[in-house]
Image: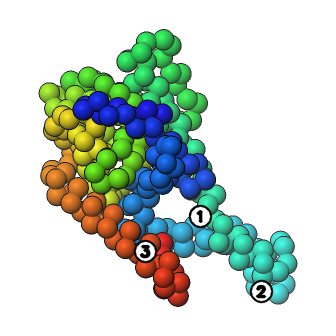
Amino acid sequence: MKIEYHDGEVIELGFDDRLHSYRIEPDNELIPSVTQTMDVISKPGLIPWALKEGVEWLSKNLFYDSERDNYHTKSVGIDFLTKGIKGAYRNTSTSAINIGTVTHEWVEGAIRWKLEGGDPPSMPPQKEAQKAIEAFRAWVSENDVEWHSAERKLYHRTHKYAGTVDAVATINGEYCVIDWKTSKAIYPEYYLQVAAYAKALENMDGVDVDSAYILRCDKKTGKFQCVQSENFELDFDAFLAAQRLRRRLKAVSYTHLTLPTILLV
């Protein structure tokens, strides 16, 4: 797709599904996404969560043998146990992603309906998604929201990163970027992510972005949470530091292939 800048420059931006990266055409220059850049930041909360899912899977697949006074599985073999425990978190994650995707698609459809007309999106059948959507509707009704775009592709020419911001809107008189989350909490790295979107939008349109919003609807309870970045200038500095770290680790990994795996993630 074509990316147009306020000074008249036009860049052709493609997307590589396999690498989950963007490409600048026709040079085929690979451009990391905002979320790829954020992967360099450790997420320690994921480890105990994955462990918890593995333990829960094991408890559901063990059966007590009263004659032998021990536990066993229906399938014999250590491979069954190891594969089941290792893959347990993926099953839960896939289920959560489905609810999150359904909710996100409805919100995107509602914004496009406001901007372009046509038929409004249908309410999805999942109760969790319905709760999240109703909370989103309530937030919109309580604020003065003017939508400008949904799922807008962004590319920062100077710092060479790209991404897709969920929405751009004027909220209570402030020009803002908005990112939608269905996670259990609002994590610190989210602030860096929306700051990167805000700065890319400024770089493209030549306008000042007043604020960055993170909207979260809990994928299980439908609880809604809205936070504003207090200082996305500082958050952007942190994002650029993550970008430099990622580039350096990538460069070092090509010359010293014996680096610990944790440094190459």
Disc 3 secondary structure class: helix
- Quarter assignment of residue 212: top left
Disc 1 secondary structure class: helix
76 lies above or below 17: below
How dense is the environment of label 2, judged by Cα within 10 Å: few (below 14), some, or many (20 and up)?
few
In the picture of the structure, the residue carrying the numbered disc 1 is: 89
Q: Residue at x 58, y 48 (%)?
A: 17
Q: Amino acid at mark 1?
A: Tyr
Judged by depth in the image, the label closer to the viewer, 1 or 3, is 3
Judged by depth in the image, the label closer to the viewer, 3 or 2, is 3
In the picture of the structure, the residue carrying the numbered disc 3 is: 251
Q: Residue at x 24, y 63 (%)?
A: 238
Of 176 and 225, the residue lying toward us: 176
Which of the numbered marks, if any, corresponds to residue 69?
2
Q: Amino acid at mark 3?
A: Ala
- The first of marks 3 and 2 along the sequence is 2
Disc 2 secondary structure class: loop
